[in-house]
Amino acid sequence: MDDGLEIRLEPSLDIDDAFSDSQDFDSDYQFSPDSIRHDLARNSLSWRVEDDEDVKPRNGFSGATMDSSSTLDLHNDERSEEDNPSSLQFVSIPLSSSHDGFSNNSEQHQEDPPDVTDTETPYPAVVIDVSSHKITISTGNAQISSPPPSTSIQNHSRSTSTAKSDHSDHSTKSLPAPEPSSVMPTHSNSATSTSTSVLPSPTTTAAVTASVSETTSVPSSTLKPSSPTHRITRSVGPSALEKFVNKTRPSFLPPKSRQEDDKHMADWETMMKQSRAAAEKRRKALQQRRLTREKKIEESLHLWEKEIVPDWRVVQKNPQLRKLWWKGIPTKLRASMWERAVGNPLALSKDHFRSCNFRAKRALNSGAFSAATLSKIEDDIASTLPSLHIFHHETGPLYADLKDMLCAWVVARADEGLGYTIGAAKVAAMFLINMPIQQAFVVMRNLLERHCLRSFFGGSGAKEDVEAYYRIFETLLADGMPKIYFNFKQHQVSPASYLPDWFVPLFLDHLPFEACARIWDVLLLEGDSFLYRAALGILGVLEPRLFFPDRHELLQLLKGENKAAIDVATREGRPLDGGKYEIYGLDEETLWERIDSMDEWWKESTWNRLTRRELPDL
């Protein structure tokens, strides 16, 4: 043909990249104007415009527009670099694609290859303007402008979906198997060219050129269909397993690798094993010291029987015997010593329990006993020393005695217009463990008649006395432990938030049983002043844990419900059915060390002075 063909490439573009060794082709190819003319002559029928009708745009393209677009300009001999300042942005290459795009792929696949001798049909010129993202196709006098790339992408998507539905056995990423005599079917090239026509980058122009050159000169027998490739999807963040393992890892850090995670988990398990072993070692050492201390108390039995049992008041005069009492009363002598220390200021007879119990049973049988009071008694018994299991409502051997004792106590207080107070079951249970029920009932009634305990068990009528005891405790706390005092003031935590929970059950809800028994030994001897000294000793042991920034957390700790401490105790295998403060490591040994250290500032004269000031009628 007479038309000249000139190929202008961007200086930075390397056509040889398309023929690199990474391609799976076995033959060497030549890229020259003669080969391009030869290929265009063979495909001359695909560029013919039927009936020379005017081309009408449709959606930015003509009715005969080609879905494949590339940088083709066969009439470039009429152009010059002076006429087109941006000539360096265009590349002229042949296009061997059908003008019908995908719509006639099945028909073209069945037709014979076009006659290579037909060279009279004019060829269109396709120009891609990179700067303006426009595609221009010239066929004779007709000139067609393409829509913006976004529109082309949408049209291409629709045409591709149509082609896939019509030809389910063909793919735009694999070449169909042609006849041995043919060079390359035109419809397969159309799909390849269309996928690269809307990319505006000049770099992709080289990819288009390489793709067109390969499809026009490579025998189809040497091509290998490429398998469809899938984009690797990566999950964002750790997996569900990693989230479970990395429960304490901050969310802003990347997830650990499996090797690092396994190593850290093994280290954590080793540390937890060592921690449990150390806790068990401390527990056994504490148990051994407690057994040694109890053995010394039992060995002092002969001294008790010789010096204290004949007249227990001697301990008030002899400091050595008083110190012996503070170390604990032997179990064998506890019932008699408690009864003597409490006394009988109410002058109750031994038959007092029998008469009160008879009245209680008669009220229960006739239905006169309050159902609400009976329900309170049942609930209070259910929470009494659950670790001992001797007050269980079904299997506990002392359940019936405890219930009878509490019902009789309610009847005895009814004469004074007082009802049941939650926490009385703990006091009654402690007496039942150490003495018979008749003796326990009398001692309990006399103990609860002491002014401080009577105020806390006296209901709303003793509210003013209770407030006076709160003020006394705050004064003692400010004198002995000012840091705790100011911390409570800052968080607005008054003694009313924790003292009733301690004083009404006499610490049985919060302290271990052995520590409570020793506190009771001294409390019955010393009176109400030791009740306050024991409370201050508990705060002294808990002092490192009391400085919370939040009031709610502080109150939870004082109630024995701190979640972190409960988790640690659970992990170490410690029982949670004992005293509530056992989870904080509070035991008999640590508590008494703190109580003994208060000798430096505690004075009985201070207690007497405060009670006379706050309770002048006492």
Image (cartoon, helix red, strand yellow):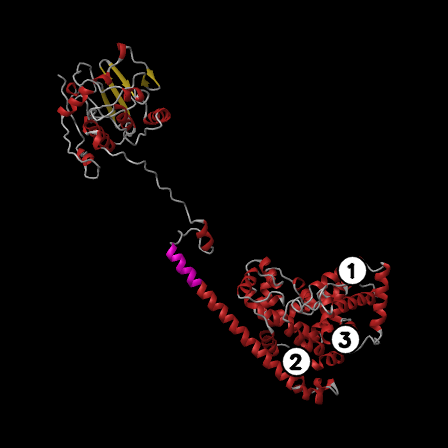
Q: CA distance from mark 1 to mark 2?
A: 36 Å
In this picture, residue 522 sits left or right of residue 29: right
Find residue 436 and name its label.
3
Q: CA distance from mark 1 to mark 3?
A: 25 Å
Q: Residue furthest bottom?
A: 306
Find residue 494 and name its label.
none
Q: In the figure, residue 229 lies in which quadrant?
A: top left
Amino acid carrying label 2: it is Gly
Pinpoint residue 224: horizontal percent, then vertical percent: 25, 34
Where are the magenta residues, as a range? 258-268
| Earlier sequence position, callout 2 versus callout 3 | 2
Q: Is residue 171 depicted above or below 388 in this figure?
A: above
Q: Which residue is mark 2?
A: 328
Q: Is 181 included in the stretch rendered in magenta?
A: no
Q: In the figure, residue 162 lies in which quadrant?
A: top left
Pinpoint residue 187: horizontal percent, then vertical percent: 28, 24
Q: Is residue 483 depicted above or below 94 in this figure?
A: below
The residue lying toward the viewer, choosing from 149 and 470, is 149
Q: Which residue is depicted at the point 30% across and 29% down?
A: 195
Q: Which residue is mark 1?
A: 373
Closer to the eye: label 2 or 3: 3
Near mark 2 (Cα within 10 A), the count class, few <14, some 14-19 or many ≥20, is many
